[in-house]
Image (cartoon, rainbow, N blue to C red):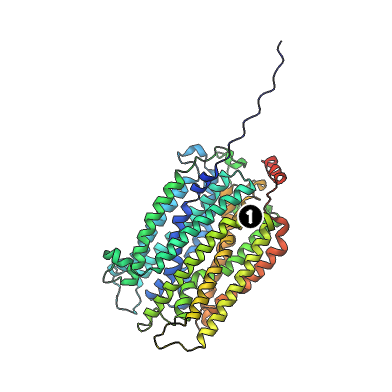
Amino acid sequence: MPPRTAPAAPTPPRKVPLRKLLRAASVACGVQFGWALQLSLLTPYVQELGIPHAFASLVWLCGPLSGLLVQPLVGHLSDRIAPAASPLGRRRPFIAAGAASIAAAVLTVGFSADLGRLFGDDVTPGSTRLGAICVYLVGFWLLDVGNNATQGPCRAFLADLTENDPRRTRIANAYFSLFMALGNILGYATGAYSGWYSIFPFTVTESCGVSCANLKSAFLLDIIILVITTCITVASVQEPQTFGSDEAQNPGAEQEAFLFELFGSLRYFTLPIWMVLIVTALTWIAWFPFTLFDTDWMGREIYRGSPDNPGETQRYHDGVRMGSFGLMLNSVVLGFTSVVLEKLCRKWGAGLVWGVSNIIMTLCFLAMLVITYVAQNMDYPSSGEPPTGIIVASLVVFTILGAPLAITYSIPYAMAASRVENLGLGQGLAMGILNLAIVIPQVIVSLGSGPWDQMFGGGNAPAFAVSAGSSFIGGLVAILGLPRARIASSSSSRRRGRTHR
């Protein structure tokens, strides 16, 4: 009898080429294009519709409240779908549906003034347009639902494609941040340009003036970019047919209720994961006042304008456009930092890099407080134009903040993705849980920042003081608590990950 030969070892799956990971992350450009427009133009816009500055932050409650459930729910559902159940796999249908929601939402927001007029709004300058506000809120809510329904599955999609290899996971998240930077650059550059209404003249109507028409035209451009990048992502690569968790491999198994599983999974978290969540929460308490009021700060405190005073409206919009230009510079630095982030993490450890970036945020927010004080106590020329030194200092702060923003967009997701597999969680649910550490601070800031600012005179400086304090505490926690929990990059760490798989 011929001797029996041992069965051949199964061929390990081929790794997805980095160029395909790059294409898979491209939808972040389209999503972030709209998000940049949202951040730079919508706080001024809602004040034009008649919402006072003290309550403008409450409008942004729509985002974190939808994100509180939508992203974990979408992640959970995409984890439970069998890859063969759809020609697009289990993540890409949610990415496509989320992008479609974003497209519908930006049309609703952009045309809210026109739709409000159909409901009987008074279009006299300075009047409160209740119909437009209601339409805007519906569109804004849908926009954040679409953002959450797209970004969560896309992050999980990248984690699936990298097979939880720590280094490739970092690279994939750096690609995602790079496309976010590109979307930011395009979005903020679009927001800084005041002539879109002349390219799309049909956007100017009796109820929608030049500034409103610019916003409407910018959102039409967003739809074009979003469609292109979504198609690239969906067509980039086939999803893997097997995954690390038993849940994913047995999608027909008995399932727990979603909310029970979401919050019940918290008891299994190890200390390093809790540290990631704590630093994420503190970081976003710091970021959210800036994202709410960055261009509004430039229009009010630096340019001394007001969106609801006809004599000061032009100065306010000049400031908003200058703020959008500063955010575009911010995004250039964000993109550069995304490229070098992998090397920084290998050299110093992800926790230390994250902590130092939060200290940089603290210094920048303190600089904004100093600039505000100086601007309030100096004489402007008769034209009302701020001194060049004040404008340059403001733009420098906006630009520097691009580096910590790139780290915020990348390191928390990479650290969470590299640690959840041994807990038996799907990547979609894991990204949803991380999202809780983002949206809960946003709810707190949305509820408190308007009244908090009003207590100290109605400006934006009090909220930035909170940002400085929160980012400083987050930086200390990251430096002291995360250096030993750095994202593994050694071959031994990768071997341990494969053993657990």
Q: Could you say which quadrant of the image residue 434 lies in?
A: bottom right
Residue occupying image coordinates x 29% and y 63%: 200
Residue at image mark 1 = 343
Judge whether residue 146 can be spotted in this image.
no
In this view of the protein, which residue sits in the foreground, 194 or 60? 194
User: Image quadrant for the C terminus?
Assistant: top right
Is 199 placed left or right of 13 in the picture?
Answer: left
Q: Horizontally, is 321 left or right of 154 in the view?
A: left
Q: Is residue 171 visible?
A: yes
What residue do we see at 70% from left, 17% from top?
A: 4
Percent coordinates x, y for residue 179 in the rendering: 49, 55
Point out the image quarter for the N terminus.
top right
Q: Position of residue 125 (x, y in %)?
A: 32, 79
Query: Which of the 4 image quarters holds residue 311?
Result: bottom left
Q: Position of residue 357 (x, y in %)?
A: 62, 65
Mark 1 surroundings: few (<14), some (14-19) or many (≥20) residues within 10 A: few
